[in-house]
Image (cartoon, rainbow, N blue to C red):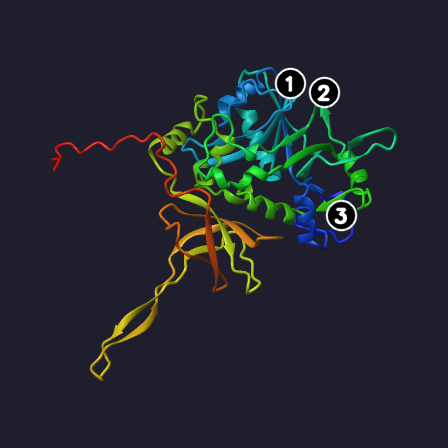
């Protein structure tokens, strides 16, 4: 369904019914970055879990510690398979009576169905609220002058449930209690990530979209994607494939509690973190924009060809001459997200093999064209092995 925001001037559909942009993606990005615009995310889904056992039940199934989650406190959690691979992700907010799970639209049916099957005899009920509740994204809570009194009032009509305003504030800006970040803490761009998602009634979207631009500026999903990439923020629908484990994306930072107890996939999470290494690692790529080409998600990342020299033995003058020769590019990963940033230019997130040299120049292949890419380390090759367990000598080995 096309969003009511399609009535806005310049609306360009991103393929899911919401705006990719409204005619000026970079200008919208600047407004969004400074907290002066909202993003229509009404294509996303909302599930609820009610009942007195809801938090302990979700705690037993997923990666985050949810028992005792206070009303209005935001967190996120992951649902893993038995081998620790990512299957679902949910942004979680509880109001004291109901747990609200904010998910991508494609997650609503499979996650809702799976949760419903896992209720057994527990006092929980799962419901799909996507039909009557929508999501609006922003970098700050937008306020408007109170025309009937003094001060300001929220410009976005946030839904309130059991006296709790349903605004999910992204916990990515810091390492959550029980979590762990592999990225360099001194230069992590997530410190400045102030993103939040407000839930509103779908019946309020028409009035919100009809507000004049001078009262409510809007930005498209392209603007949000660029800022998300800048913050190294992973997303299920872009960074995750059938092999992904949380360690590869530094998602241990905000969605995994390492000491909370058992859940499906917990053994792999602990093993890789304590004594192993994730097989792949997330990097941010700064792309050469001189050709004006942006790769698509899934584009191959390779080691940039290196020009060396070989000796031409056929030289009849008695001396061998060096002849330039380029080594064939070797594939090391793929692009997961890409955007044009208003300050950084073309940027991307990519998953590469753990052993890829952290200082090596990379390139992204687009229709046979090699786009140079400088890697910025998000997850280092040394990630994991946190327990520092010494390697035991093989039985019968002789020390020298």
Name the residue that disc number 3 marks.
6
Instruction: Kindly check if marks 2 and 3 are in contact, taking CB atoms under 8 A apart as contact.
Output: no
Farthest right residue in view: 148
Q: Mark 1, residues whose alpha carbon is within 10 Å: few (<14), some, or many (≥20)? A: some
The answer to which of marks 2 and 1 sits earlier in the sequence is 1
Identified at 80% across, 42% down, the residue is 215
Q: Using a 10 Å C-alpha cutoff, classify the residue at mark 3 as few (fewer than 14 neighbours), some (14 to 19) or many (20 or more).
A: some
Determine if residue 367 is in view.
Answer: yes
Calculate the distance from the C-alpha at mark 2 to the C-alpha at mark 1: 9 Å
Displayed quadrant of residue 317? bottom left
When the figure is inspected, residue 64 is found, relative to residue 370, above or below; the finding is above
Q: Quadrant of residue 228?
A: top right
Taking the view exactly as shown, the residue that stands out farthest to the bottom is: 317
Residue 309 % position (x, y): 30, 69
Query: Real-space Cα distance between discs 2 and 3?
Result: 32 Å
Residue closest to the eye, 24 or 80: 24
Q: Residue 76's image quarter?
A: top right
Q: Earlier in the sequence, mark 3 or mark 1?
A: 3
Secondary element at tag 2 = loop
- Is residue 235 among what the camera can see? no
Asked if marks 2 and 1 touch (Cβ < 8 Å), the reply is yes
Q: Which mark is residue 163?
A: 2
What label sits on residue 96 in the rendered view? 1
Query: Residue 332 placed where, x, y %?
Result: 40, 52
SS assignment at label 1: loop
User: Could you say which is closer to the camera, residue 72 or residue 266?
Assistant: 72
State whether residue 56 is above or below residue 326: above
Number of on-image labels: 3
């Amino acid at each position: 369904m096309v969003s009511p925001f399609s009535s806005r001037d310049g609306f360009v559909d991103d393929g899911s019914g919401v705006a990719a942009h409204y005619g000026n993606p970079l200008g919208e990005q600047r407004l969004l970055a400074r907290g002066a615009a909202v993003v229509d995310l009404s294509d996303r889904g909302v599930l609820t879990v009610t009942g007195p056992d809801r938090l302990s039940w979700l705690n037993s199934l997923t990666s985050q510690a949810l028992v005792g989650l206070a009303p209005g406190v935001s967190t996120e959690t992951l649902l893993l398979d038995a081998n620790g691979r990512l299957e679902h992700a949910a942004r979680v907010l509880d109001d004291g009576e109901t747990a609200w799970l904010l998910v991508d639209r494609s997650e609503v049916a499979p996650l809702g169905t799976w949760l419903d099957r896992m209720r057994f005899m527990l006092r929980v009920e799962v419901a799909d609220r996507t039909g009557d509740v929508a999501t609006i994204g922003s970098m700050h809570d937008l306020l408007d002058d109170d025309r009937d009194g003094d001060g300001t009032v929220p410009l976005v009509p946030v839904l309130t449930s059991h006296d709790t305003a349903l605004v999910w504030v992204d916990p990515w800006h810091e390492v959550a209690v029980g979590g762990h970040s592999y990225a360099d803490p001194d230069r992590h761009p997530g410190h400045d990530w102030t993103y939040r998602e407000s839930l509103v009634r779908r019946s309020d979207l028409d009035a919100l979209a009809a507000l004049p631009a001078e009262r409510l500026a809007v930005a498209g999903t392209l603007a949000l994607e660029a800022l998300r990439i800048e913050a190294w923020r992973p997303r299920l629908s872009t960074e995750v494939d059938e092999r992904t484990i949380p360690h590869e994306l530094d998602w241990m930072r905000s969605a995994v509690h390492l000491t909370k107890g058992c859940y499906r996939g917990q053994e792999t999470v602990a093993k890789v973190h304590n004594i192993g290494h994730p097989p792949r690692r997330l990097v941010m790529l700064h792309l050469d924009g001189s050709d004006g080409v942006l790769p698509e998600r899934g584009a191959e990342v390779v080691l940039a060809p290196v020009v060396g020299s070989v000796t031409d033995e056929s030289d009849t003058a008695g001396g061998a001459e060096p002849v330039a020769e380029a080594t064939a590019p070797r594939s090391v990963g793929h692009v997961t997200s890409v955007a044009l940033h208003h300050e950084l230019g073309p940027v991307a997130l990519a998953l590469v093999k753990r052993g890829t040299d952290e200082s090596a120049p990379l390139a992204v292949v687009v229709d046979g064209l090699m786009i140079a890419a400088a890697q910025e380390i998000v997850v280092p090759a040394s990630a994991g092995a946190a327990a520092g367990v010494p390697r035991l000598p093989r039985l019968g080995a002789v020390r020298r």
